């Protein structure tokens, strides 16, 4: 058995600083609580070197020196925890999220079951190095430890900097170097052991077990087994997320699109990086912008929600950022933005097998950006693919979003081929029709007279009688002489060319008693 542990020191600070590059290599302090109860909740090592301590007031912390401070953000901590889990899932499917002893709502530790992973990822030392590298890519400075049981790995990660690999059977020897405070025991227990003269894990582990139970109870025995590295309990495995999300609370309201795109770019880079860790992409992106209320007394904050549905799965931050830019230009938020929240629906990445002799087609990403630019120019809902609607009304259709054939379902792609198509004239061509026994015998359109050679009909269709725009008509399919029937768009023809025959659709509008040529069969 082998277990790895990833520990993020000063988690609230890193949850904020990983998305804000300006906070790197600066003393950062996180405050919590409303004035006058504002206290220091967390601080990074640079801030502690200036003398900042936990539970200091805001005034005391600022008096220590030049610091960068932020309010604690629960939403950013939640997304940071999700990013930390993504890093662990790159190595093992069985992981557990451990909360900090002092704060159950602050899971800064992740434990992985890496039993058997050596065959895929190499030695334990290499796995620890890979975990540290992957977490650094998403903005975390972590400690990684590997041991034969999960509790020993957690203690080593919280106690030793860098990467630590504990050989099997050496848990008590290596953990004995740590001070008792690194185990994060209750304050009462720690104070009792200090009065006994016990300051390290080695000294605590050397005490007689029965005597520890008599004086400290079963809880003391459990902490002693933890100091020895022999405490074992099963992992509570975490389920894989159904969606990927990230967010950022802005220090100041942002009303310029360029400034907003700068923050969106950072969030999208993190989301795409996490998707790539799992060899995934996204086909739906939801961006929620929390707006500053117009009335300073208003407590409710409005939200501006934009949803992008992509024709093909994508995982490139630049492509998604460009689509968001075009969408926000067409639908700008109505007030300055104070918070950004992005949710990406995961989906398998797109794979393509290009043919050697097939012509090159435009890249889907470039085509989608072009369509978005056209839609910004001509208006929303006027760019896409026409599709029939569930109606008998002639010419009724709707405009759907363009989706590449390769992104459609198999049932849609493998439909039976169309054997005949009606090329519709828009608008229909006015005509005069001569009848004999109520059947068309001659069609006159655009000054040309055509004799009907064969016909089928009439096909009466009507509808909308319950609405303000009812319609009714009799349709006929007629075979008449024509030139170039596959390519002509009207009845106008050059008489010097050879005549052929073509099948046309004509109809009588029963409401206006007028004849029209609707189209030609191809």
Image (cartoon, helix red, strand yellow):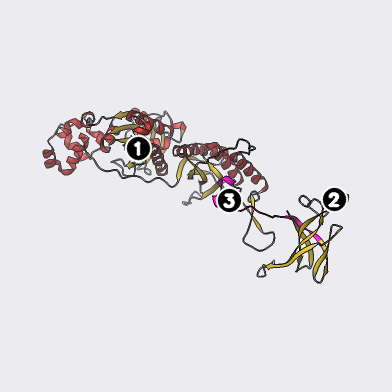
- Give the mark nearest the N terminus, 3 or 2: 3
Q: Residue furthest bottom?
A: 437
- What residue occupies the far right of the structure in this picture? 496
Question: Which of the two discs, 2 and 1, labels the residue nearer the N terminus?
Answer: 1
Residue 421 on the magenta segment: yes
The residue pinned by badge 2 equals: 498
Q: Earlier in the sequence, mark 1 or mark 3?
A: 1
In the image, residue 175 above or below residue 508: above
Residue 130 falls in which quadrant of the image?
Answer: top left
Q: Secondary structure at mark 3?
A: loop
Disc 2 element: loop
Residue at which label 1 appears: 40
Give coordinates of residue 77: x percent, y percent: 39, 41
Q: Which residues are magenta?
A: 405-430
Labels 3 and 2 touching (C-beta < 8 A): no
Q: Nearer the viewer, mark 1 or mark 3?
A: 3
The answer to whether 311 appears left or right of 75 in the picture is right
């Amino acid at each position: 058995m082998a277990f790895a542990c990833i520990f993020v020191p000063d988690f609230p600070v890193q949850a904020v600083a990983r998305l804000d590059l300006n906070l790197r290599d600066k003393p950062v302090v996180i405050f919590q609580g409303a004035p006058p109860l504002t206290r220091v909740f967390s601080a990074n090592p640079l801030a502690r070197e200036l003398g900042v301590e936990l539970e200091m007031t805001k005034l005391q912390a600022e008096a220590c020196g030049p610091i960068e401070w932020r309010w604690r953000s629960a939403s950013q901590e939640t997304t940071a925890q999700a990013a930390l889990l993504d890093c662990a899932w790159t190595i093992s499917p069985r992981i557990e999220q451990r909360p900090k002893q002092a704060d159950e709502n602050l899971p800064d530790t992740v434990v992985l079951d890496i039993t058997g992973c050596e065959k895929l990822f190499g030695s334990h030392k290499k796995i620890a190095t890979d975990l540290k590298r992957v977490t650094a890519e998403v903005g975390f400075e972590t400690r990684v430890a590997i041991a034969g049981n999960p509790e020993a790995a957690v203690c080593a990660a919280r106690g030793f900097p860098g990467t630590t690999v504990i050989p099997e059977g050496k848990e008590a020897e290596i953990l004995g170097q740590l001070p008792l405070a690194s185990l994060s025991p209750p304050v009462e227990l720690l104070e009792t052991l200090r009065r006994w003269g016990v300051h390290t894990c080695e000294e605590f582990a050397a005490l007689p077990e029965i005597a520890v139970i008599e004086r400290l109870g079963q809880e003391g025995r459990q902490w002693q087994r933890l100091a020895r590295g022999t405490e074992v309990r099963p992992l509570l495995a975490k389920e894989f997320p159904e969606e990927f999300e990230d967010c950022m609370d802005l220090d100041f309201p942002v009303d310029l699109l360029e400034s907003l795109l700068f923050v969106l770019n950072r969030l999208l880079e993190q989301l795409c990086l996490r998707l790539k860790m799992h060899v995934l992409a996204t086909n739906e992106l939801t961006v929620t912008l929390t707006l500053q209320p117009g009335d300073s007394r208003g407590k409710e904050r409005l939200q501006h929600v934009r949803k992008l549905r992509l024709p093909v799965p994508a995982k490139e931050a630049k492509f998604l950022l460009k689509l968001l830019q075009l969408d926000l230009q067409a639908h700008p938020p109505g007030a300055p933005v104070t918070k950004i929240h992005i949710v990406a629906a995961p989906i398998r990445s797109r794979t393509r097998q290009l043919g050697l002799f097939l012509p090159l087609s435009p890249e889907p990403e470039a085509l989608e950006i072009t369509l978005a630019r056209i839609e910004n120019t001509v208006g929303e809902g006027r760019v896409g693919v026409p599709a029939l609607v569930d109606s008998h009304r002639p010419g009724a259709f709707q405009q759907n979003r363009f989706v590449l054939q390769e992104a459609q379902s198999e049932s849609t792609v493998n439909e039976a081929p169309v054997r005949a198509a009606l090329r519709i004239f828009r608008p229909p061509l006015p005509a005069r029709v001569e009848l004999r026994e109520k059947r068309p015998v001659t069609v006159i359109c655009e000054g040309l007279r055509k004799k009907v050679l064969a016909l089928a009909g009439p096909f009466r269709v009507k509808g909308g009688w319950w609405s303000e725009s009812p319609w009714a008509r009799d349709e006929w399919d007629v075979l008449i002489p024509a030139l170039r029937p596959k390519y002509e768009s009207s009845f106008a023809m050059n008489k010097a060319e050879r005549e052929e025959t073509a099948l046309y659709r004509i109809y009588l509008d029963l409401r206006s008693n007028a004849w029209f040529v609707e189209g030609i069969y191809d």
